[in-house]
Image (spheres, rainbow, N blue to C red):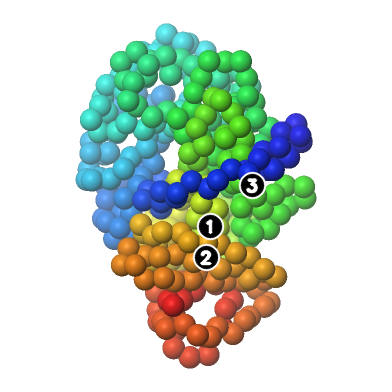
Amino acid sequence: MFSFYLLAFLWVWLLKVKKGNFDNFFGMNVNLDKGLEQIELIKELNCDDLLIRLPLNDMKNIEQYKKFIESFEDKNIIINILQDREHIEDTSLLKKNIRIIFSTFKGICDSYQIGNAVNQSKWGFFSMKEYLAFYTTVQSVRNEKFPNYTLIGPGVKGVEMKYNVRALFNSVKIKFDKVSSLMYVDSQGIPEQSKFLSFDLSKQIHTLYGLSSLAIKSKNDIILSETSWHIKGEKEANEYAVSEDEQAMYMLRYYLLALGTKRVQGVYWFQLISSTFGLTYLKKGKIEKRKSFYVYKTMLEFLKLCKVEKYSEANGLHVLTCKNVKGKKLDIVWVKDSNITVELTEFNEVFDMYGNQMKKNIKITNSPIYAYH
């Protein structure tokens, strides 16, 4: 198995980087059960790309999902079809309900992630063999009457690349139009950090890109369909939870690192409203915005539809150079280590990660800043 990773990692450096299409890079997970308040929040963020879960065990409410999705006007939507044991075991039922879903959203949505966290048994699949059979059934329905639909998978959660290998290299007659991953790195702390023998975020992306490029069963268009950091003190927070300041910083650095690889089409934060890990949360029935909400909003203001020119890292100093939609060149710079600061010189305008202009005593820290040439 290690030889697969090594081959993929080496192969990626032989591949010419495609001209990056980052028009749909900045995505957000929104959920029906979080309510219509999300519409105005998405407008405020100016986010155009949404991922919405549709559980197969909630087919009775499919018309509500349709109305919910239609309420987001002029957005690019991916519907994530969530599995359950009944549909995994009953192929006829799966075919029936996939036909209903595909028909219901015809003209509304043509991109579907098939399955979610397929490597974790609590989500329903007990093996990748079961997932591949599930995907094959969905693909057969697509091929019959919906040939223009995009199918995305396998949706492996975490850094367990062996499951991606199993999904991409086998004898099953399937094809992933795009490759998805729930690439959480919260257990590694900061996104630039490696853990034990695992790669840091950038190397994980390059490895997945290499695998998908080697495989005949997939294209190498990559979607990172979920990522987040939990907030300390929240009831359901995990052991890797961080402060609100850290969540905002790590989120921004995650997006910047993924953008810098030029290998990813979209990154979707999970999720917009959640007390545990959302950019916002409900408090006494009222929406409260976390610091990460404003950092995400600023990120889109500066980088939406940008052209990535280059990314570099040396001695812990990270520099991502982009050209924005107005043709202005800027560097986004930060250091990995919270104990290190570097003086910034020779830039016209500099803004912190909240969009506030910085005019004197400007230091490069672990909090990224936007510096215009």
Q: Are marks 1 and 2 in contact (CB under 8 Å)?
A: yes
What amino acid is found at the position of numbered circle 1 in the picture?
Gly
Task: From this view, report whether residue 119 is shown above or below residue 310.
Answer: above
Q: Is residue 285 visible?
A: no
Q: Are marks 1 and 3 in contact (CB under 8 Å)?
A: no
How packed mark 2 is, by other alpha carbons closer than 10 Å (few <14, some 14-19, many 20 or more), is many
Task: From this view, report whether residue 156 is shown above or below residue 131.
Answer: below
**Residue of label 3:** 13
What amino acid is found at the position of numbered circle 2 in the picture?
Leu
Quadrant of the frame with the C terminus: bottom left
Q: Earlier in the sequence, mark 1 or mark 3?
A: 3
Cα separation between marks 1 and 3: 15 Å
Q: Residue furthest top?
A: 92
Image spot of residue 308 (x, y percent):
46, 59
**Residue of label 1:** 260
Image spot of residue 92 (x, y percent):
42, 8
Instruction: Determine the residue positioned at 33% across, 54% down.
Output: 47
Instruction: Determine the residue positioned at 23% across, 45% down.
Output: 74
Image spot of residue 299 (x, y percent):
41, 64
Q: Secondary structure at mark 3?
A: helix
In this picture, residue 156 sits left or right of residue 87: right
**Residue of label 2:** 320
Q: Earlier in the sequence, mark 1 or mark 2?
A: 1
